[in-house]
């Protein structure tokens, strides 16, 4: 075991603060990575504040990492010291269940999440995430990072990127489809970029009228301010697919009513409280409502390679880790353009 610097929260009401955590020494199959950048996902905030329940403290969040390999175990074949590498929301799974065999590790019943999951290696009670200097991960859960992209802008691809890429692919978003993206935050802005890259007609729904110009620049064909009922009504019954990335309570029926026959709305946003669904919003037009969780490792690699080929990265605000609590407050106000990313070099001075 060795110690590494990190930022952790001691309770649901404590700010994140400097800490020291233990990491395991790399085993045969492990890759040790010096973390260069780590994105701030709204899930970090939900988790730190225990909005979903089950938080174990201290909690070290962060599941959007890019860095450099510093050491590899003797059985590691895909990475060597000096390589760029990424780590997302998962660090282990059983590898034997039907979901793992289908490259859908995110649905493995024995999944180990990057943070706040029981630590199979018993280095600590739970796993610790990317707001830290370094991490040790089984090579099966390490991603190759294209070397032509801005690294700070790559970090958010490991969660916000795959979480939007996967459902857009799954629901067949291609040229000729009309696609809505609800909420222009970290996930939403990646959803816009991917839906555009896949050739769809993209409409952004936002509660922030001042994001209109940005939405168009990011690839939207049209922007609807969702608080304006008349503007919403104009799109009634017209969407093939809507991706809902909203992190707080909102009226899902208003979006269901915009779907055409057999249209689907997929929730990736995970608000703290249940959403109310009117039966008629689904019955009329045989509409469906689904969810989606990140994406498997193979698909995450496919997404990263796609981003390399198409020059896609997140639009980021790079911050030192000392500003992380301020960033959380801004996230709650939907005030981020469009992902905060921590420059981990700032942790060295702690
Ligand atoms: P974010 O950057 O904070 O973006 C959320 C956006 O939702 C905001 O920018 C805002 O967009 C909109 N919004 C916020 N409050 C709202 C309200 N009260 N009513 C309507 N719209 C509101 O968050 P994120 O990191 O993209 O994450 C979004 C959600 O996805 C979170 O709940 C997160 O936990 C979840 N998530 C799920 C997965 C998964 O695998 N399913 C993965 C990652 C994250 P506008 O200003 O445009 O309205
Ligand atoms: Zn996330």
Image (spheres, rainbow, N blue to C red):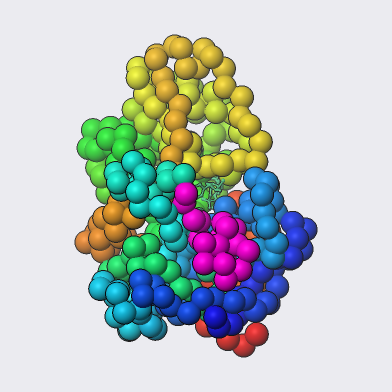
Q: Main secondary structure of the magenta part?
A: loop
Q: Residue furthest bottom?
A: 349
From where the camera sits, is residue 314 visible?
A: no
Q: Which is nearer the eye, 40 or 192?
A: 40
Q: Position of residue 16 (x, y in %)?
A: 69, 68
Image point (52%, 67%), residue name:
121
Image point (49%, 56%), residue name:
112
Image point (57%, 58%), residue name:
118
Q: Which is nearer the eye, 83 or 203?
A: 83
Q: Which is nearer the eye, 349 or 252?
A: 349
Q: Is residue 334 magenta?
A: no
Q: Position of residue 151 (x, y in %)?
A: 38, 72
- The image quadrant that residue 274 belongs to is top right
- The image quadrant that residue 69 belongs to is bottom left
* Apparent side of residue 272 relative to residue 130 in the rendered image (left or right): right
Q: Position of residue 302 (x, y in %)?
A: 26, 55
Q: Position of residue 36 (x, y in %)?
A: 46, 77
């Amino acid at each position: 075991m060795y110690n590494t610097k990190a930022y952790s929260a001691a309770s649901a009401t404590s700010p994140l603060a400097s800490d020291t955590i233990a990491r395991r020494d790399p085993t045969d199959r492990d890759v040790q990575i010096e973390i260069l950048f780590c994105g701030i996902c709204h899930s970090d905030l939900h988790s730190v504040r225990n909005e979903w329940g089950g938080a174990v403290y201290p909690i070290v969040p962060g599941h959007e990492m890019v860095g450099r390999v510093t050491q590899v175990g003797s059985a590691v074949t895909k990475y060597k010291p000096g390589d760029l590498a990424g780590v997302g929301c998962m660090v282990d799974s059983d590898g034997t269940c039907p979901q793992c065999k289908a490259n859908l590790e995110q649905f493995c019943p024995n999944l180990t999440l990057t943070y706040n999951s029981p630590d199979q290696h018993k280095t600590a009670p739970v796993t610790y995430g990317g707001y830290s200097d370094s991490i040790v991960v089984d090579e099966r859960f390490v991603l190759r990072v294209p070397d032509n992209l801005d690294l700070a802008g790559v970090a958010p691809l490991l969660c916000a990127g795959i979480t939007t890429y996967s459902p857009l692919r799954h629901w067949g978003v291609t040229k000729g489809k009309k696609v809505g993206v609800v909420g222009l935050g970290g996930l939403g802005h990646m959803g816009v970029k991917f839906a555009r890259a896949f050739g769809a007609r993209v409409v952004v729904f936002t509660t922030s009228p001042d994001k209109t110009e940005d939405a168009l620049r990011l690839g939207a064909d049209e922007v609807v301010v969702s608080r304006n009922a008349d503007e919403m009504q104009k799109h009634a019954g017209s969407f093939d697919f809507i991706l809902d990335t909203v992190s707080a309570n909102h009226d899902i029926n208003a979006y269901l009513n915009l779907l055409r026959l057999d249209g689907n709305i997929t929730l990736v946003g995970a608000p703290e409280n249940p959403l109310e669904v009117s039966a008629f919003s689904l019955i009329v037009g045989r509409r469906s409502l689904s969810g989606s969780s990140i994406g498997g490792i193979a698909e995450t690699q496919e997404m990263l390679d796609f981003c390399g080929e198409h020059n896609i990265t997140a639009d980021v605000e790079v911050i030192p880790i000392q500003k992380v609590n301020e960033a959380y407050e801004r996230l709650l106000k939907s005030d981020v353009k469009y992902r905060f990313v921590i420059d981990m070099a700032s942790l060295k001075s702690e």
